[in-house]
Image: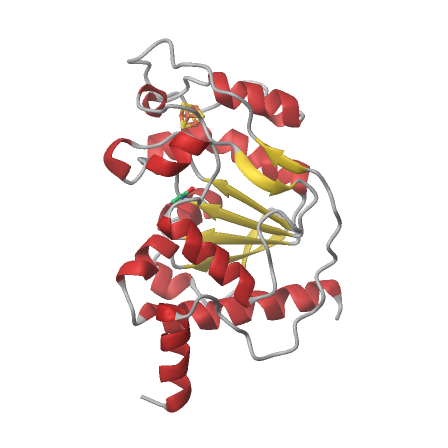
Amino acid sequence: MSADREFILREMGLGPRWKLRVALAESAAKATPMEVRTAPEACASPGAEPVATVAGAGSMNWDELRSAVAACRQCRLCEGRKQAVLGVGDVNADWLFVGEGPGAEEDQRGEPFVGQAGKLLDNMLAAIGLKRGVDVYIANAVKCRPPENRTPTPEETAACLPYLERQIELIQPKLIVALGRPAAQTLLQAEVKIGAARGRLHDYRGIPLIVTYHPAYLLRTLLDKAKAWEDLCFMRRTMTGKKGG
Ligand code: URA
Ligand code: SF4
């Protein structure tokens, strides 16, 4: 293992922050308002069968989306949630990160990626000069916490997809990063293996999409952190290219 590689692994495994040793484009830190979900409504009707579409999501504004998701019972994930978690960040962001679904802490707090995996995601963002809420929006493939943190089923991700699609339409990001397999498969509507899909540009309705490992997986798997590092550099290069500088 090269000294460089060892350094990278140490940085990613132990360092408080990842540091990218290339010049980082200054983030256009527009002070746009944070979009955070509102107070929850209880899931009133357990046992509903998943259905494939959410009527009308395609024309909703942010307030309507927030209310619809808070009250949504389109799949059985509504049964176990404390609250639905729409997303967080800059609604005009160039960067959109999409995870899998809320965990226990996210379900408690109503914000994506606030637990252990979220700390790693924040470090990953910092490594490429980004900060939660500043030119970055963070969402999940499903808005309600799967019981026991299991992977959401294809039916559940399909039921929830209209919300994510609408978020993307409203945000119009320049780059989408799919964190882990469920997010990648949901957005690309295809079977995805992260090892094969990472390192190249995919397309979501004309928006470049990059696939990388989920931070929760990286917390368990030291070796793939080096690959995640490469993916971060690839993301930064791609965005720099998109912005023309
Ligand atoms: N893992 C995810 O995929 N999303 C979260 O919001 C938290 C953990
Ligand atoms: Fe609705 Fe999505 Fe929650 Fe299922 S996960 S109940 S589709 S908001």
Residue 102, visible in the rendered structure = no
Q: Is residue 17 above or below residue 108?
A: below
The quadrant where residue 9 appears: bottom left
Rendered-image quarter of ligand 1: top left
Q: From this view, report whether residue 107 is shown above or below residue 130.
A: above
Q: Would residue 195 be found to the left or right of residue 127 on screen?
A: left
| Nearer-the-camera pick, 107 or 182 | 107
The C terminus lies in which quarter of the figure?
Answer: bottom right
Outermost residue on the front side: it is: 16
Residue extending farthest to the top is: 44
Q: Which image quarter holds the N terminus?
A: bottom left
Where residue 240 appears, as percent x and y from the top left, is: 68, 68
Q: How many marks?
A: 0
Could you say which quadrant of the image residue 196 lies in?
bottom left
Residue 90's image quarter? top right
Identify the residue at horizontal 59%, vertical 19% (top origin).
Answer: 56
Q: Residue furthest left?
A: 148
Residue 43: tell me if it is visible.
Answer: yes
At horizontal 32% and vertical 19% (from top left) the residue drawn is 79
**At 33% across and 69% down in the image, what residue appears?**
224
The x, y position of residue 58, in whole percent, is 61, 27
- Position of 184 relative to 157 (above/below): below
Residue 173 picture location, percent across and down? 65, 48
